[in-house]
Amino acid sequence: MTTRSSTETLNLDDLTDPVLTETQRQILDYTESQHVTFDIDEMLAEAVQQAGSFDLADDDGFADRLAAHVAAIESDTGLRQLIRSSLRARVIRKVRNRLSLTDLLKRYPEIASIHIERPLIVVGMPRSGTTHLVNLIAQDRRRRALPYWEAEDPIPTLGQGPDVFGVDPRYTRVKAEHEALMASTPYVAAMHDRFPEAIEEEVELLDLDMAGYVLEWHARVPGWRDFYLGLDHVRHYGYLKKILQALTFLRGPRTWVLKSPQHAEQLTPLMTTFPDATVAFTHRDPVAVIQSAITMMAYSDRLRRTSIDPDWLVDYWSDRIHRLLTACVRDRDLVPADRSVDISFHHLNGNEMPVLTSFYDLAGIDIPPKVATRFQAYIDDNRRGAKGRIPYDLRRHFCVEPDELRSRFGFYFDRFDVRPEI
């Protein structure tokens, strides 16, 4: 994969009216000829065959959530067959992992007694520095984090061990998928590079229970948003804890570092499930968040959708971020002040050690010299724009005035130290 210079500004002149590369045209020419269907019985049969198990542990309506998830995908008539194929494979993978988890818990009941003690949790809007911060904290090898390859495929299939070189087949599979993504949409690395070792969100784990908001990032599914928001998330975060217990059993008993923007609107279930957590909230200008998110979405949609529709992206994601922040401001005090810290985006600017030290002090954790050295090395190697600079431009690409959009978020600026960026 080509490494981009930090001084390179990437060209997004065709963001909302894409001009496809020859590689992209070839991909779509092939995949559009392959019609993808979402027959639930067929997908379940494939998952059962892969897992070698058939117990879905459906004691709380999983089948209904699965049906709602699939129906939401089918309701989006603008998806190309390429993304439909990817989403179908994702559903099968989540169900297979659920089957494998149920089987693992039956064979090793002691997993249920594993304590998930005093996790460090990063919470904030998407595109607000949560990924940067959790990857920074994960440089502390005393922490147990969730790399992307494991988030995508958390529970090994019974009988599938490492290859002759000792490499986990789940890692190999995710690495191949990442390389294919970089070949087809290379600017993704500068926006949000999910390479296999990168630390990612445990919200992917929630979709083993079909209870996460992730589908909103793959398709235009307001029906799923409403269904997801109506769920009893205390129950589903309890299921997330089961998965973390299993992962601790499989790969080592260390204190977890977790992160997800979804937690910002689910603070009650988060703190009910992890009452001794120490939480770092990241905060950023919502207009910059929306601009960044919809630019990334529009770029990805050149292969995912038959049309971009920038107005839809503005309307949906400005509303979505508003909903998330409304819940976050409402529930912020559920996390005790002596176990939480608010970190503004402008503090994640290459001088993160002071805010990181404050966070560790709250958690009662020391930072030995070797760990401090690892932290600083990561900061130095991952400065903003290191993989190319994206010319984000809300006015030019989406015909929106930043101040007009920002006027919806006065309640958020009143509560936290947030600086307008645009």
Image (tube, rainbow, N blue to C red):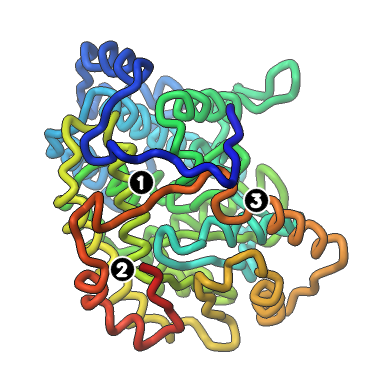
Mark 1 vs mark 3: give the one in front: 1
- Residue 154 at least partly seen: yes
Mark sitting on residue 224: none
Crowding near the residue tagged with mark 1, few <14, some 14–19, many ≥20 C-alpha atoms within 10 Å: some
Apparent side of residue 328 relative to residue 256 in the rendered image (left or right): left
Tell me what residue is drawn at x 66 percent, y 43 percent. Answer: 250
| 213 lies left or right of 382 | left
Corner quadrant of residue 107: top right
Please name the residue shown 27% across and 49% down the image.
216
Residue 296: which numbered mark, if any? 1
- The amino acid pointed to by label 2 is Leu
Q: Earlier in the sequence, mark 2 or mark 3?
A: 3
Q: Residue 112 appears at what percent x and percent y?
A: 57, 55
Query: Which type of secondary structure does the marked residue at label 2 adopt?
Result: helix
Q: Is residue 165 above or below residue 279?
A: above
- Callout 3: SS: helix
Whole-percent x, y for residue 128 in the image: 45, 63
Instruction: Residue 248: give its label.
Output: 3
